[in-house]
Image: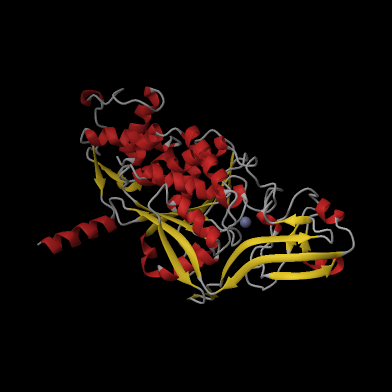
Amino acid sequence: MSGVSNLRDKIDAPAIGHECHSFIAELFPICRSITGNGLRETLARIGKHIPLNIHEVPSGTQVFDWTVPREWNIRDAYVKNARGEKLIDFQKSNLHVVNYSVPVSARMPLSELKKHLFSSPEYPDRIPYRTSYYNETWGFCVSQRQMERLEDGEYEVRIDSTLENGSLTYGEFLLTGASEDEILISCHACHPSLCNDNLSGVALATFLAKSLMGCQPRYSYRFLFIPGTIGSITWLARNERNVHRIKHGLVLSCVGDRGKLSYKNSRQGNAEIDRAALHVLKHSGQDFNVADFSPYGNDERQYCSPGFDLPVGRLSRTPDGQFPEYHTSADDLSFVDASSLGDSFSKCVAMFEVLEENRVYVNQNPKCEPQLGKRGLYRTFGGYGDSQTRELAMLWVLNQSDGKNSLLDIAERSGLSFAAVSQAAEALQGSGLLRECEPAGERARAAAREMVRG
Ligand SMILES: [Zn+2]
């Protein structure tokens, strides 16, 4: 068994949920964007937990049909009335400035200013979050109440930002396992002070990486902390030659709210990650949702574009766009919750455990049932359910292990939990009744290594 299987027993998910929440609180004030120093500062703080590689891709670099944009940085922004009072202040909330606003220093009447103000009348106390990455403009976001308080008169408007040639930054961490085959974990880190949408995924990915570091997994795990859309496109453009190693993948997004877990299938629809996710959620005893793939959402759109079609699903609680706090100042520290983060963490670990342990075996005594009692296989291993379940799991594994069915196939067909099936397989293998089939890829690699040695 790989070290990941023991991780669930060792980890304290509620404690990790609290650590995730504190990390979100630490990152919350930083003004992030798809490029710039806020994103760099965020990656530097992730780098205190895990050995993150930072990549800088120059502005103007062509990445498939897109171009890496110029780098945006902001120091301050405000709107003052004629009495010199700051009515809109970037220092109070970085959501007040339309992300990627070009610099402005001007005086103008309210009628002119209003062309650059955004509010959401349906939630009059919230500041909406707006961006203008690919259209050079400027603007301020305010609550509807703030908007209504603005009186006629002249206003001083200042945005101290720069938009110039620089680079796009992303962070990458490869945890090397026994195999070159990879599990990809991707999250976006490009939103300013918003918690569920971006920081929950960032925190969860950071602490998953940190926990897996002590595990000696079978798979290699590649963690990407990237700006949404342009980041995954850039990564895919630079790593096209190696994407065949990605055997399973998860985009983590909106994983910290109090809603039920929601998994979105990969474009393939029946990939092993899709089946592992469904299995874990089904056996969790909690309410959940599984959605079909659609080309709307997060970076799974790029990983699952037809030219790549990678087996990458998306794990969320309430998916983006489906909660009223989405892209507003109400997606704050109170909207994300330590126990939900802890629950998302333990479900990810359970999914990894299925992927790590999902193997194919051959029954070494296939003619009629072997006599389990004389081999001491009754009630000799514990941990999952009663002895009846353990015996049932052994009978299923023996019956189905013909070199074709994987343990996940057996778990699905029997209705038993993967853990019960996997434990049965381990016990049967220990007594010589099962032999593992090496996957074709691993067999070929082993042969190639022999050739080099020979
Ligand atoms: Zn978003």
Is residue 417 rendered to the left or right of residue 343? left
Q: Nearer the viewer, residue 329 or 209?
A: 329
Is residue 15 rendered to the left or right of residue 322? left
The image quadrant of residue 332 is: top right
Query: Residue shown at 56%/63% (left/top)?
Result: 34
Q: Nearer the viewer, residue 27 or 435?
A: 27
- The total of numbered circles placed on residues is 0
Among all residues in the image, which is located at the extreme right? 152
- Measured as percent of width and height from the top left, residue 205 is found at 47, 48
Q: How is the image coloured?
A: secondary structure
Q: Nearer the viewer, residue 114 or 16?
A: 114
Picture quarter with the C terminus: bottom left
The image quadrant of residue 121 is: bottom right
- Measured as percent of width and height from the top left, residue 150 is found at 85, 57
Query: Residue shown at 60%/56% (left/top)?
Result: 31
Whether 41 is drawn above or below 58: the answer is above
Whether 298 is drawn above or below 195: the answer is below
- Measured as percent of width and height from the top left, residue 91 is found at 67, 54
Is residue 78 rendered to the left or right of residue 43? right
- Measured as percent of width and height from the top left, residue 318 is found at 62, 46
Quadrant containing ligand 1 reads bottom right
Query: Residue shown at 54%/33% (left/top)?
Result: 285
Q: Nearer the viewer, residue 430 or 391?
A: 430
Q: From where the camera sits, is residue 200 visible?
A: yes
